[in-house]
Structure formats: structure tokens, C-alpha cells
Amino acid sequence: MAQRLLWPTIQLIVLAVWIGAAVFFSAAVAPVLFRVLPTRALAGEAVAGMLPVVFYSGIVAGLVVLLVELTLDDGHPWSGRTVAAVVMILACAIAQWFIAPRIARVRDAIAGPVDNLPVSDPRRVAFGRLHGLSVGWLGIAILAALVALVLVARTFQTRR
């Protein structure tokens, strides 16, 4: 009995830790950096330096859930937990490998802080759109992780 609960417990811990870190980063760390650092540009650099940790750890957490699901013999290779893990992995990968490099290119094309550009400047518009996409993909990853967490937690009820 205890052996059957080992892997779901590991999944639960990995998901809870990642969700906590991602939400803490989004709700506390990033806003505080923008509030206390002397410039928004400096805060943006700090946040951009930390985001890869959030995204890569999300990919790893999703892979842990996925690999456990694929090795467990419950007869459901595409369970809700599996789908949620795949969504989590894809959302973090898209944000890190596709959106973040585009944000970096836009920043490189701007001589100074983004805030110094007129609101209608195409580079500022592009930056804002890409920033929104990055936040959106992180939100999708967090929601997928929450779904996976709930579904994993429900396995404890059915295995009693």
C-alpha cells in the first residue's frame, strides 16, 4: 500500500513546490522588484534573469508528472494528469524558447528603456504584446499544474 502511494506523493510534492514558486514569483517577487528598484528597466532585467528558472523548473516538474504517469500501470496513458503535464511542459517551453528570445530581440533593438518609447512605437507595442504572451503562457502552465495537482490528490481517495 505505501509503495503504491510513493509516486503520487512525489508528483504531489513536485507540483506543489513548483506552483508555490511560480505563484510567489508572479505575485510577490516581480511586483516588488518593480516597486523597489530605482528603474523599471533594472527591474525588468532582474525579472528576465529569473524567469528561465521558473520556466525550466516547470518543464522539469511537468516531466516528472508525465514520466510517473507513463510508467504507472493504470491503463490510462492519456489521463487528465498526463494531459495537464503535457500542457504544463508545452506552456513553459513556449514561453522560454519562443517568447523570451523574441522579447530579448525587441529589447536589444531599443537603445534605452522601453518606457522611454512613445506608446505607439512599434517596438513598445511588440514588447507589450510579447510580455502579455509570456505572462499568459505562465498562467496556462500554473493552471495546468493546478489541474494535475488536484487530479493527483484525488488518486489518494481512490487508493484507500
Image (cartoon, rainbow, N blue to C red):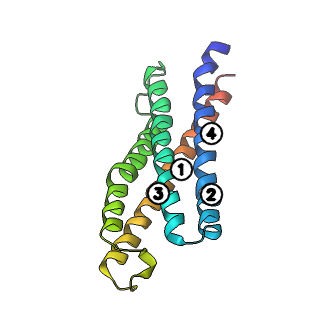
Tell me the crowding category of disc 3: few under 14, some 14 to 19, or many 20 or more residues within 10 angstroms, Cα based: some
Does the image show residue 96? yes
- Indicate which label's residue lies in the foreground, 2 or 4: 2
- Amino acid type of the residue tagged 1 in the rendering: Ile
Give how far across and how far down residue 85 sits, in percent.
Answer: 46, 39
- Amino acid type of the residue tagged 4 in the rendering: Val
Give how far across and how far down residue 158 sits, in percent.
Answer: 64, 27
Q: Nearer the viewer, residue 60 or 90?
A: 60
- Amino acid type of the residue tagged 3 in the rendering: Ala
- Indicate which label's residue lies in the foreground, 4 or 1: 4
Residue on which disc 1 sits: 142
Q: Kindly indicate whether the residue at mark 1 contacts the one at mark 4 (C-beta within 8 angstroms).
A: no
Q: Nearer the viewer, residue 130 or 152?
A: 130
Instruction: Tell me which label, 4 or 1, sits earlier in the chain.
Output: 4
* Residue 29: assigned label: 2
Q: Kindly indicate whether the residue at mark 3 contacts the one at mark 4 (C-beta within 8 angstroms).
A: no
Give how far across and how far down residue 121 sits, in percent.
Answer: 33, 83
Instruction: Tell me which label, 2 or 4, sits earlier in the chain.
Output: 4
- Indicate which label's residue lies in the foreground, 1 or 2: 2
- In the image: residue 156, left or right of residue 124: right
Tell me the crowding category of disc 1: few under 14, some 14 to 19, or many 20 or more residues within 10 angstroms, Cα based: many
Helix, strand or loop status at disc 3: helix
At 53% from the left and 51% from the top, the residue drawn is 143
Residue on which disc 4 sits: 17
Tell me the crowding category of disc 4: few under 14, some 14 to 19, or many 20 or more residues within 10 angstroms, Cα based: few
In this picture, is 122 found above or below 1? below
At 64% from the left and 52% from the top, the residue drawn is 24
Disc 4 from disc 3: Cα separation: 21 Å
In this picture, is 61 found above or below 104? above
Residue on which disc 3 sits: 48
Q: Nearer the viewer, residue 64 or 79?
A: 64
Helix, strand or loop status at disc 2: helix
